[in-house]
């Protein structure tokens, strides 16, 4: 089979991308950028426009000039056009549709009484996935792009692995404890519930087993991993995947709307999505849809998602024992399957990649090892005294009038340790240690000082906290890997794959899925504080 | 998505999930090295 098709479209896409970047650079799109309020994206419009445009032009020429023969080069080079197709859709959605909807939502608010873009959560993540679904189901993915669309899952997995670089030990220790408890309860609980209902409704043991892994653990990959130990047939795996996809897609769109209407914070929503949504890809989609401008929610959600993947070996061994006992009780011959062998051969390596990236990051190669959410403490003179573009020195020590303001309000602080930290701040005109910084944050949060005094403390705190440039770069890259993966994922959600869901597996999967989603929502709202 | 490809599956170009995972790991390590040396 030859995959490279003779077409002019990759070249056209490349010319559009480069042309757009050139128009942005030359300032000719200034009015449009101002209207859409997309000034913050200009940097990436230039970098990504030129980079991807250049690659698309090269790929376009390959498609026009090359005489491809079946083989490795044809197979792998032909994926580039599909990647460029996805990126083109992502650019249009992120830099065009998303800000346009935000504008329309604001403009229509006086008439409608509510901001429809905000209420319906119409951001670039949701619209990107919707665009993908519309492309594949209404227009069809063009033949020359089909091979590349199959790289979207690689993009999602790469994003998850890279995400490991953003966690610090402190964050992982705090989130880890919470996730093990929540996931432990809901994963084991939902597997158990599917097994009980499946038996009651006389579903075949193989069907019940594979469905329980899919609904309980992490969706499609768990179903595929559990299939050999319960000797599931292809049709049963297809039923399970259809159920998970249908339920997962609904959750991906509904969860952010519910989360926003309940006023959930990043940690709460991340914990809920990572526990309640059945499939890994849709967890990422919902988390980014909830917070499209940052990845704090995604970080929390992925910790929960990865924790449940780590439960996979336990579930596979459990299902193996359950299946053998059930079949033997029914006096049927059971083909022996080595559960440990299945675990070793099916365990998702990308989870180990995430842990490896976290361990690499915790050595301090991307940010000081004590960083928290990518920001670290540094009060050295080099960090406080900087130069602006014109070479003028900017001294970030507190000024005399600022220390005088703090001195005047010092008696408002009641705690001795906080008072001591503020005294050291006044004497040295800068926060003296990480512990003092924590005290300063405590005073800011307590709102013990006046507005002016709190502003001085906020400045003192801000100038000693620095975002590691490498971590900032990782954040941008991760957001784009997920955007690419999710738009491509939308292009793989076909009506035929969802139509596979049906019958008893859909009923049982839906019952347990709803119990899991609602149950985890209640637990998260009651027990998870926004800051942990 | 129906599988109309003679290699991989409807969802991936790689022969198995394990191959895809390893490729994602290799890609991530390459990107991490680039970030480490260039940023």
Image (cartoon, rainbow, N blue to C red):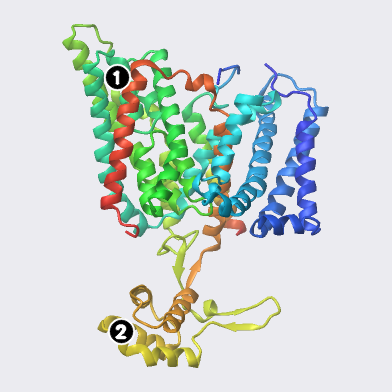
Please give left or right for residue A244 compared with residue A466 in the image. left
Q: Are marks 1 and 2 on the same chain?
A: yes
- In the rendered structure, find residue A208 and report the number of the disc placed on it: 1
Please give left or right for residue A421 compared with residue A350 in the image. left
- In the rendered structure, find residue A413 and report the number of the disc placed on it: 2
Of discs 1 and 2, which sits in the foreground? Answer: 2
Residue name at image x 30 percent, y 15 percent: A206
Horizontal and vertical percent position of residue A27: 79, 59
Q: Quick one: A529 or A81, which is closer to the camera? A: A529
Q: Is residue A116 shown to the viewer in this render?
A: yes
Horizontal and vertical percent position of residue A229: 31, 19
Query: Could you say which quadrant of the image residue A74 lies in?
Result: top right
Q: In which chain is the residue bearing label 1?
A: A
Q: In which chain is the residue bearing label 2?
A: A
Q: Is residue A310 shown to the viewer in this render?
A: no
Query: Could you say which quadrant of the image residue A276 lies in?
Result: top left
């Amino acid at each position: 089979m030859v995959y490279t098709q003779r077409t002019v479209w990759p070249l056209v896409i490349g010319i559009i991308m480069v042309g757009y970047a050139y128009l942005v650079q030359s300032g000719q799109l200034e009015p449009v950028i101002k209207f859409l309020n997309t000034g913050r994206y200009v940097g990436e419009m230039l970098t990504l426009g030129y980079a991807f445009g250049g690659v698309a032009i090269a790929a376009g020429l390959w498609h026009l000039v090359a005489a491809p023969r079946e083989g490795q080069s044809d197979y792998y080079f032909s994926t580039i056009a599909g990647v460029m197709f996805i990126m083109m859709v992502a650019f249009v959605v992120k830099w065009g549709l998303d800000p346009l909807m935000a504008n329309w939502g604001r403009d229509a608010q006086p008439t409608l009484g509510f901001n429809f873009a905000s209420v319906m959560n119409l951001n670039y993540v949701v619209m990107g996935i919707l665009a993908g679904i519309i492309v594949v189901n209404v227009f069809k993915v063009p033949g020359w792009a089909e091979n590349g669309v199959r790289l979207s899952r690689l993009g999602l997995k790469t994003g998850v692995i890279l995400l490991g670089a953003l966690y610090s030990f402190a964050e992982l220790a705090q989130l880890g404890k919470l996730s093990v408890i929540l996931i432990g309860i809901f994963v084991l609980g939902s597997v158990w519930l599917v097994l009980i209902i499946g038996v009651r409704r006389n579903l075949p043991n193989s069907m019940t087993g594979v469905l329980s892994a899919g609904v309980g653990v992490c969706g499609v990959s768990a179903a595929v991993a559990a299939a050999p130990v319960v000797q599931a047939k292809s049709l049963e795996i297809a039923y399970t995947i259809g159920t998970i996809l249908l339920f997962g897609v609904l959750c991906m769109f509904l969860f952010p709307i519910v989360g926003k209407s309940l006023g959930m914070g990043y940690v709460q929503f991340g914990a809920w999505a990572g526990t309640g949504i059945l499939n890994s890809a849709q967890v990422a989609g919902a988390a980014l849809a909830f917070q499209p401008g940052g990845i704090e929610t995604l970080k929390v959600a992925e910790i929960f998602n990865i924790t449940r993947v780590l439960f996979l070996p336990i579930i596979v061994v459990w299902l193996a024992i359950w299946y053998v006992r059930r079949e033997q009780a029914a006096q049927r011959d059971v083909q022996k399957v080595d559960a440990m062998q299945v675990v070793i051969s099916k365990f998702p390596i990308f989870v180990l990649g995430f842990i490896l990236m976290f361990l690499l990051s915790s050595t301090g190669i991307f940010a000081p090892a004590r960083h928290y959410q990518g920001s670290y403490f540094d009060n050295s003179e080099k960090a406080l005294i900087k130069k602006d573009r014109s070479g003028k020195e900017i001294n970030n020590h507190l000024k005399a009038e600022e220390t005088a303001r703090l001195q005047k309000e010092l008696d408002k602080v009641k705690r001795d340790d906080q008072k001591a930290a503020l005294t050291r701040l006044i004497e040295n005109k800068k926060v003296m240690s990480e512990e003092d910084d924590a005290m300063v944050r405590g005073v800011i949060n307590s709102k013990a000082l006046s507005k002016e005094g709190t502003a001085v403390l906020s400045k003192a705190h801000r100038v000693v906290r620095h975002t590691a440039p490498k971590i900032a770069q990782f954040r941008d890259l991760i957001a784009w890997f997920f955007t690419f993966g999710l738009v491509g994922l939308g292009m793989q959600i076909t009506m035929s794959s969802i139509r596979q869901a049906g019958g008893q597996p859909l009923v049982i999967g839906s019952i347990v899925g709803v119990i899991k989603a609602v149950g985890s929502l209640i637990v998260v709202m009651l027990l998870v504080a926004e800051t942990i | 998505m129906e599988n109309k490809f003679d290699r991989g599956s409807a969802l991936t170009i790689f022969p198995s999930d394990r191959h895809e995972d390893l490729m994602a790991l290799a890609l991530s390590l390459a990107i991490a090295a680039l970030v480490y040396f260039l940023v």
